[in-house]
Each structure stands twice: as C-alpha cells, then as structure tokens.
Amino acid sequence: MNTDIHKLLRLKRYETPTSDYFERFLDQFNERQRSELLRQPTWNLLWERLVGVFPEFRVPNLAYAGVAAAAVVLSTFILVTQKDTAPTGPGLALNDPRPTVNVLPPGSGDIRFPVSSRSEFPPHYVLEARPVSYESPYSF
Amino acid sequence: MAETVEEQEIKDVDLVARTQAGDPRAFDDLVRKYSPRLYGLVYHMTSNHEDTNDLLQDVFAKAYRSIKGFRGKSSFYTWLHTIATNMTINFLKKRSRTYNMSLDDVDNGIHQDPDFIEMTSGPDARREVNLKELQQRLNEAMMKLSNEHRAVVTMFDIQGMPHAEIGKVLGVSEGTVRSRLFYAHRQLQNYLQEFLVN
C-alpha cells in the first residue's frame, strides 16, 4: 500500500458539513417522507392498509403464473364455444358447394365420367388408360 | 465507553426489528446514527454537497421502503452502504461530464492531525501547503478516477473500512478490492506528486 497517498487521502475525512446539518437532515427527511406519502396513489395507500391489517398476507410466488394460466384457459373456452355456436341451418343448403354434372342419357355419347357425389371430396375422374409413367422404361 | 462492533450490531438489529414492526422513531435513530458516515461516502464520490444531500435523502428513503425485505443476511451497516454505493454510482453515470465541484468546509481538527503537521512543517516539508488548495487538488484527483476506483478509495483510505467489508458492499472479491486500490493509488500518486513528502 502506498502510505503517503493513504495519509494524504485520510485528511479528506475532515471535509464535513457543520454539526447542525445532520440535525436538519433528519427533519428534512421526515418532511419529505410525509409529502411522498401524500403524493402516493389511493390504491397504493389502500394496499398498504390491507397489508397492515393482515400482516401475513402476501401475494404467493405462483399467483401471477396462475392468473396467466387461468386467462389462457378462459380465452380457449370462449373461442371453442364461439366455434360451436357458429350459424348453421337450411340457409346454407342453398349454397351447396357440390358441383353439378350433366349426365348424358344412356347411349347418347361415347365418353362417360363416373362422378363422385360425396360432398367432402372434389369430383375425380378415372380414365381407363394406364398413365404413361406407369409404363416400364424397358417395354419398348 | 465506546461500543464494540458487536454491541453496535445488536443495537442495529433491534432498531431494524422495531422499524419493521412499524415504529418510525427507530428508523430515525438509524438515520441519526448512519447519516454522517454515509454523507462521507457519498460526498467523497460526488465532490458536491447539494448532490450528496439529495442522494442521501434518496438512499434513506429507499432503505425505509425496502427495510421489510431486510433479512439480516449481512449487517445493516453493509446493507445500507451497498444501497448508497449503488445509487451513487448510478447517479454519477447519469450526471453530465461537466459539473460544479462544491466543497465542504474543512473541519478545524485537521490542524492537529499528525499527518497534516508532518506534511506542512518539519525538514521534509516540500512546500507550504494551502489548506484550500490541498482540498481542491485532492478532490480533483479523486474525480479523475473511475467511479468504481473512487468508491474503493473512499471506503478504504478515507473511511477506514477493511478490504473484506468493501468487497461485501461492492459484491466483489477481496482480491479485486486490493487490485483496484493499487491501480487507484498509482494514478493518484501522479496527480498529487507535489504534495507527497517522500
């Protein structure tokens, strides 16, 4: 340790305010505390009173996580309920998305396409010929 | 008879418990007890009386708000010094680079201090030291240090705190405290060469 520097720096401890400063300081501190108390929002004061009445009352550590989980469950429930109660009824039958196919009477044409009438699938057509890709490359 | 450190700590524990139980007069006693010491800590880091006064008010207000959470893992003294040091360092980081130094008056006790007598008289005295000039130069030199180095110098050299206690306050190892002190002293030696006797 550099003792010369240490001795020099120790002289700084004599830089102090006058003794009455510290007496005034406490009064100033108490005054400030009181004015801060008056500036506090009402809910904060109510909360402090509540904690004062029930000193053991504390917000549990997992309370915030619990509230967040409850909010997620509630919003999911609301979404599911809305989906189930979506408008259904005869009005929708008018807009049936099934394609209409004009089927030729028997013997009136050479080409016929068997049409699937199931509504959940689009109609698909089956040709009798094998696709070219199914031919073996060595067949020629 | 002066109280021992243990007796003081027991008294602090009692005052803290009474404050936690809602007795504001107990906290007043803690303010009375620690304000001169904390004033020194903050003042020697800021070199400004007005800033020190405002900061000290904030430090005690924060301590009062947080005292219910004080569990006594460290001494109240260490806990309070930690709050004061952190708040002062944060304040200094925000304070603009240009600031006005406002120095406190030097207590008359300095004239009886053996180190001061040695420096200003006797065969080794390099120059006649003007007290005001010495104060000014010491503070200027201190303000050239980084906030962290100044904190260590204030606690060790001016306030006489042991290395281990400073480490606890700053949350660093004793080795870090020693290394910061070494570096700070080397810097200060350059700034204050003309005031050093040897």
Image: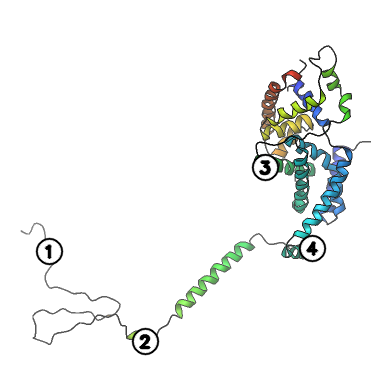
Rendered image quadrant of residue B80: top right
Q: Identify the image quadrant of the C terminus of chain B.
A: top right
* Residue B164 picture location, percent across and down: 74, 34
Disc 3 element: helix
Sequence order check, earlier mark of 2 and 1: 2
Q: Which of A140 and A20 is in front in this view?
A: A20
Amino acid type for the residue under numbered disc 1 = Val
Question: What amino acid is labelled 4 in the image?
Answer: Gly
First-in-chain label (1 vs 4): 4
Pointers 4 and 2 within a single chain: yes
Q: Alpha-carbon neighbours of circle 4 within 10 Å: few (<14), some, or many (≥20)?
A: few
Place of residue B21 in the rendered image (x, y in percent of width and height, measured from the top left): 83, 56
Q: Most extreme residue toward the top, as rendered?
A: B123
* C-alpha span from label 1 to label 4: 87 Å
Q: Crowdedness of circle 3 by 10 Å Cα count: few (<14), some, many (20+)? A: few
Discs 3 and 2 lie in a common subunit: no
Tell me the amino acid under the disc marked 2: Gly
Q: Is residue B198 above or below residue B102?
A: above
| Identity, as a three-letter code, of the amino acid under mark 3 | Asn
Badge 4 or badge 2: first in the primary sequence: 4
Residue hosting label 2:
A91
**Residue plotted at (83% across, 52% down):** A30
Labels 1 and 4 in the same subunit: yes
- Real-space Cα separation, disc 1 to disc 3, in angstroms: 79 Å
Residue B83, can we see it?
yes
In the rendering, which numbered label is found on residue B90?
Answer: 3
Q: Mark 4 or mark 2: which is in front?
A: 2
Q: Circle 4 is placed at which residue position?
A: A52
Q: Residue A132 carries which label?
A: 1
